[in-house]
Image (tube, helix red, strand yellow):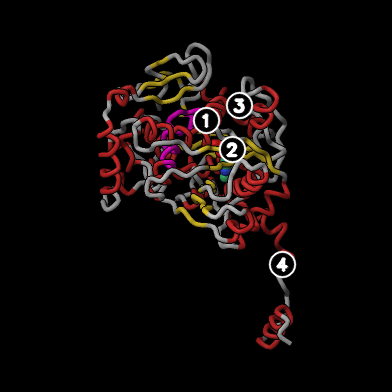
Amino acid sequence: MKTNTTQAISTDHILRCVHCGIVQATADRMFRCHKCSELLEVVYPEWEHSDREFGLRLREIWRERRGSTLPEDASGVWRFRELLPHVESQHVVTMAEGNTPLIHLTSAARTTGVTRLLVKHQGLNPTGSFKDTGISMAISMARAEGFEFVCCASTGNTSASVAAYAARAGMKSIVLLPAAQVASGKLAQAIEYGAHVLQLNTDFDGCLKVLHEVVRNFPAYLLNSLNPYRLEGQKTVAFEIMEQLDWRVPDHVIVPGGNLANGSALGKGFQELHSLGLIAKLPRISIIQAAGANPLVRTMREKAGKELVRVSAETRATAIRIGNPASWRKAVNVLESTGGQVEDVTENEIADAKSELGAEGVGCEPASAATLAGLKKLVRANFVKSDETVVLVLTGHMLKDVDYMLASGVKRVIGPMAADAATVISTLERIHGQR
Ligand code: F0G
């Protein structure tokens, strides 16, 4: 069991405070700035001296690795290791995460009027959510540091991912969940992967607060997205999108927002490609929240992004039921530097968007469908134009939250009926009006 409170980090990167800008070489177990207690981000000083050739060579190296059988090359995270903190091979915990498809939507393209509309389906990761890319990175840091325990607070997906990757790494995982507020698929995953599952009588924000205290007094490595290494893994989605679009930058990328790390990571990924000369412009990155859990929307509208407006969160999209988001400053930076928008969408808008995606064979969980609902609003506001290329990031697999679907879709099931072909055929003919 590791008990020291300071983590050594490798020398290829440093940590910089997103608020006061102070640079530090090490982080304590809370991953907060030593001076002002804000969040830290990973920066790579060596890149400042890299020439344009470096960027172009990277594209070649990454492409070649796709044909390799090495576990790190087969990963959609570690394949991009030139742009990640260095971790010795023997500590890397990977399950070929990333590598998710970019799918053209046809029906939603028609209804929104946006003809080049694609989804990057991060729900097709090993544990069914985008979390796997970040957890692969951060848990590898934990393993390199010699930790035995890893921990997180979660609305469900992080806990599933942490539990799975800890099991792969031979580590023990502790997950704090808001009691009765986690979709059953996610809870079942954490149990199956052998986590210590602790349900607390509070919401996600309350769980995270308790976890802070726990980590101060118990030698577990924090895997929430306060941990800046999580974002390093998650930023690779930007690299994959660019490869899949043959390096043609989309006009818009839209993500759902909860604790606001994912939008931040996506922005960081694109910004790094831009500063290395791999892309000539940035996409506008927009973040969509549920109307009942919209602290970023209110922060931008009421405080111009200067001060967080906390809310008491309520939404059936339980993944993003968060009122006090940790990464709000990072998200504000991404909105401002890419010229993106923040929007909120109602429960009905989320449900409709989810059904619409489902009806064209693209399943996702409610939080992910918020992106399509948000796109519709952004089109109506003329922020997104019909001739622009738009990528929606779908963050979670549809089977994570089966209860949500059954609650609304059960009426579409016909029967029970007699178990004979004549009854089935006459029912089908009645439905299709062939008689
Ligand atoms: N979509 C899904 C499916 C999620 O699980 C989450 C967050 C988000 C979107 C929002 O991402 O927090 O980076 O803005 N889930 C976390 C969890 C909070 O514990 O699984 P974010």
The location of residue 65, given as percent across then percent down, is 27, 48
- The residue identified by callout 2 is 287
Residue type marked 1? Val
First-in-chain label (2 vs 3)? 3
- The residue identified by callout 3 is 210
In the displayed structure, 204 sits above or below 63; it is above
Q: SS at mark 3?
A: helix
In the image: residue 283, left or right of residue 405: left
In the displayed structure, 425 sits above or below 14; it is below
- Would residue 223 be counted in the magenta stretch? yes
Residue 302, quarter of the rendered image? top right
- The residue identified by callout 1 is 334
First-in-chain label (3 vs 4)? 3
Q: CA distance from mark 2 to mark 3?
A: 27 Å
The magenta region covers 222-238
First-in-chain label (1 vs 4)? 1
Q: Which mark is residue 412?
A: 4
Q: Which mark is residue 18?
A: none
The location of residue 168, given as percent across then percent down, is 39, 44
- 10 Å crowding of disc 2: few (<14), some (14-19), many (20+): many
